[in-house]
Image: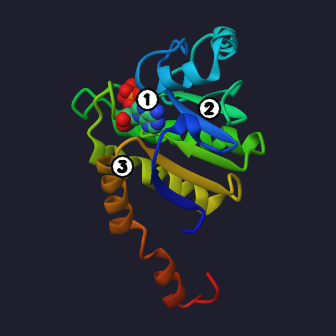
Amino acid sequence: MDRFSILVGDITASDAQAIVNAANTTLLGGSGVDGAIHRSAGPDLLAECRTLGGCETGRAKLTKGYRLPAEYVLHTPGPIWRGGTYGEAALLASCYRSCLELAEEQGIETVDFPSISTGVYGYPMAQAAGVALKAIMDFLREHELPRRVRMVCHTEAAAEIYRQTYNMWYAGEKAERLLSPEGGNA
Ligand code: ADP
C-alpha cells in the first residue's frame, strides 16, 4: 500500500498536515508524546484544549497545531491496558478510526500517528501494532482521504515490530491483487 509507511522519529517534528496526540480523557496534557506535543505547540494549544470538555477513550477531537509544523492535532485518548479482556483492542481500533474519520471530514490530506497506548498506558507493542495496522489499512482501502498515513515510532525497536506485523499481514496485498481474477492495474 503506497499510501502508508512506518518510520522512526519525533512526531512533533512531523511535516504531516495533522499529527495525532495519544492524549488522556481530560485533554489537558500529560506525559510522553502528549507532553512533547504541548511543549512544542506552546500554551495556545492547552487554551484551545480547555474549551473542548475532554474526550472519551476511543474518540477524537481536533485542534489547531499552533507552533507545531503540523496544521492540526487530532487528540485521542487510548485505552489503558488492563490485561486485554476489557475491550482494549476495540477501543484502540476506535482511536485510529476516529482520527481518520475526523481527518477525512476536515479534508486533511496527510496524517502521522504515534503508537497509541504503548507508553504509560502499557499496551503490549506487538498487539497494539496488529490493531493499529488493521484499523488504518481497513480505512485506507475504503476512503480516498487522507491520501497518506504514516506511523511515526519513537524507537527503532518499535518500528521493527510495526514493520514485521505489516510484512506479515499486508506486504503481499499488491501482489495478491495482481494475481486475482479481477487482476488489472491494482
Ligand atoms: P500512552 O499514554 O497512550 O501510552 P505515551 O505518550 O506514554 O502514550 O506513549 C505512546 C507512544 O508514543 C510510546 O510508544 C512512546 O514511545 C511514543 N512517543 C513518546 N514520545 C514520542 C514522540 N515525541 N514522537 C513519537 N512517539 C513518541
Q: Is residue 74 left or right of residue 165?
A: right
Q: Which residue is mark 1?
A: 78
Q: Is residue 165 left or right of residue 78?
A: left
Q: Residue at x 42, y 68 (%)?
A: 170
> How far is disc 3 from disc 2 in space, using C-alphas?
19 Å
> What numbered label is drawn on residue 129?
3
> Based on the displayed image, in which of its 4 quarters is residue 153 positioned?
top left
Q: Residue at x 78, y 45 (%)?
A: 107
> How far is disc 1 from disc 2 in space, using C-alphas?
12 Å
Q: Which residue is mark 2?
A: 74
Q: Is residue 108 left or right of residue 97?
A: right
Locate residue 181, reporting x and y percent. 54, 91
Q: Is residue 11 above or below residue 161?
A: above
Disc 3 CB within 8 Å of nearest ligand 1 atom: no
In this view, the residue in front, 6 or 42, is 42
Q: Is residue 51 visible?
A: yes
Locate residue 25, reporting x and y percent. 49, 16
- Give whichever of discs 3 and 2 has the lower sequence position: 2
Mark closer to the observer (1, 2): 2
> Based on the displayed image, in which of its 4 quarters is residue 93 positioned?
top left
Locate residue 7, reporting x and y percent. 46, 53
Q: Is residue 169 above or below residue 52?
A: below
> How far is disc 1 from disc 3 in space, using C-alphas?
13 Å
The residue under label 2 is which amino acid type?
Leu
- Give whichever of discs 1 and 3 has the lower sequence position: 1
Disc 1 CB within 8 Å of nearest ligand 1 atom: yes
Q: Quadrant of the N terminus?
A: bottom right
The residue under label 1 is which amino acid type?
Gly
Q: Is residue 79 visible?
A: no
